Amino acid sequence: MGMGIVSDSEFDLELKNSNLNSSPKESEIESRAQIIDKSPRGRGEGNLQVPDSLRKIIGEESSINGRTSALAIADMFSISPSSVSAYNNGATSTKSYDTPNPALQNHINNARQRIANRAKKKLHLALNNITDEKLSSAKLEVISGVARDMAGIIKTMEPSQNEDKDNDTRKPFVIFAPVIRDERSYEVINVNEI
């Protein structure tokens, strides 16, 4: 018989012919055979763990372009908004939100640092192109706009007041002294010796 697609009856006939004396019973064949449904690509059915590469992408997107953009990506992969918040924080799940994953946190910090470095270069170019001659010949609205922008840059670049308070080494110490009691405040127990 040639190779190809055959009917069930032809298959059973050839199966009987190929196994002359040692052919297993039909019930034995059915008990050993398994039909396994191939799951779709991706995480697979029942697997809830998100791959690290996807966590990095979503965390970086949330950190750089905002939560809305990261939620759009997460929605494509059926990832919850709370997980997006965890990835932005550097954690691998909402359960480990307070203990970030070092690899994920480093990836997000490196992405932020790349953008900050580019922004610093552009800021230096812009500041170098603002000369005294250009400011003296500019209109009042342009000069005030430049001053406002420079004030915003200074505010962004300098550490905030809250950070200074956190780094302050002069923390107040409160020492509570014990209350001093007189002998008369204690109960007296008389013991008779025998």
Image (cartoon, grey):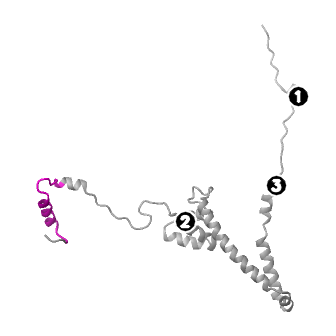
Residue positioned most to the top: 194
The kind of secondary structure element at disc 3 is: loop
Amino acid type of the residue that numbered disc 1 sits on in the rendered structure: Asp
Tell me which residue sits at (13%, 63%) in the image: 14
Residue count near mark 2 (Cα–Cα under 10 Å), binned few <14, some 14–19, many ≥20: many
Mark closest to the chain's N terminus, 1 or 2: 2
Q: Residue at x 69, y 73 (%)?
A: 116
Image side of residue 3 versus residue 192, left or right? left
Q: Is residue 25 magenta?
A: yes
Establish if 113 lies above or below 33.
below
Residue tagged by mark 1? Answer: 182
Q: What whole-number distance in Å separates the C-alpha atoms at marks 1 and 2?
A: 66 Å
Magenta stretch: give its range: 4-26
| Residue 169: assigned label | 3
* In the image: residue 183, left or right of residue 65: right
The residue singled out by tag 2 in the image is 55
